[in-house]
Amino acid sequence: MLVGVHNTGLSYYKVLAYMPRKFIKKYMPSEQTFKDHPSLKWLGRYLKHPSLWHLNRKSVARAFLVGIFCALLPIPMQMLLAAFLAIVIRSNLAISVSLVWITNPITMPPIFYFTYKVGTFVLGSQALDHNMSFSYEYVKTHLVALLWPLLTGSLICATVFSVIFYVLINRFWIWHVRSNWKKRSKDESE
């Protein structure tokens, strides 16, 4: 992506810098798309805060914090929770809600099995046998044995991974901006 063209007397040179913000904005739905969405209409006046739509280091890092935290919770309506939390902590709404799709019908079983195993380890409880099935009958008969380890492991994993990604996004963004500035100043001095 072209950031600037500088006149150095006889020749022009191009400074190429692909900022994370530009990459994200390219694939992100518009603010109006969210405001017009039927399930988010009730949030009308709360959707006016600029932090929900700006793409800067802080709002994107907070969006990863919210989105990954909500994605790893074994609850229905994760997207609504992510939207609510994004509004409360003023993170980028689109990214917060989109990251919830880390847990989708394909990735849910391995992710929640992992969080279940973390929960059994932390609680010191016995994990159910390997002949586990995710059928309604199996879950109904073993609900209590599944529920507490799953919730505990999910809360632990959600907290740990969301904080890790919050820090990583912050650090990556700072590194990327600094390296682009160094590249620009190096190109300008030549």
Image (cartoon, rainbow, N blue to C red):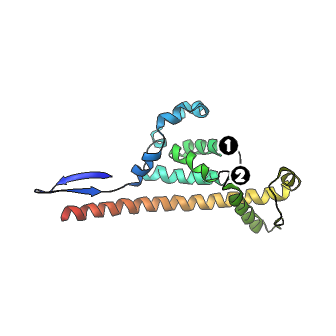
Specify the label residue 128 is tagged with: none
Task: List x then y, in percent, for residue 59.
Answer: 47, 49
Q: Amino acid at mark 1?
A: Met
Q: Amino acid at mark 2?
A: Pro
SS for dot 1: loop
Q: Is residue 114 above or below residue 48?
A: below
Question: What is the quadrant of residue 81 in the picture?
Answer: top right
Specify the label residue 77 is tagged with: 1
Q: Nearer the viewer, residue 53 or 190?
A: 190
**Residue depicted at 49% across the width and 54% down the height:** 61
Assign the C terminus to one quadrant of the image: bottom left
Whether residue 10 sits left or right of residue 168 in the image: it is left
Q: Nearer the viewer, residue 102 or 53?
A: 102
Whether residue 91 sits left or right of residue 187 in the image: it is right
Q: Nearer the viewer, residue 63 or 94?
A: 94
Q: Quick check: can you spot residue 90?
A: no
Specify the label residue 74 is tagged with: 2
Q: Is residue 33 above or below residue 127?
A: above
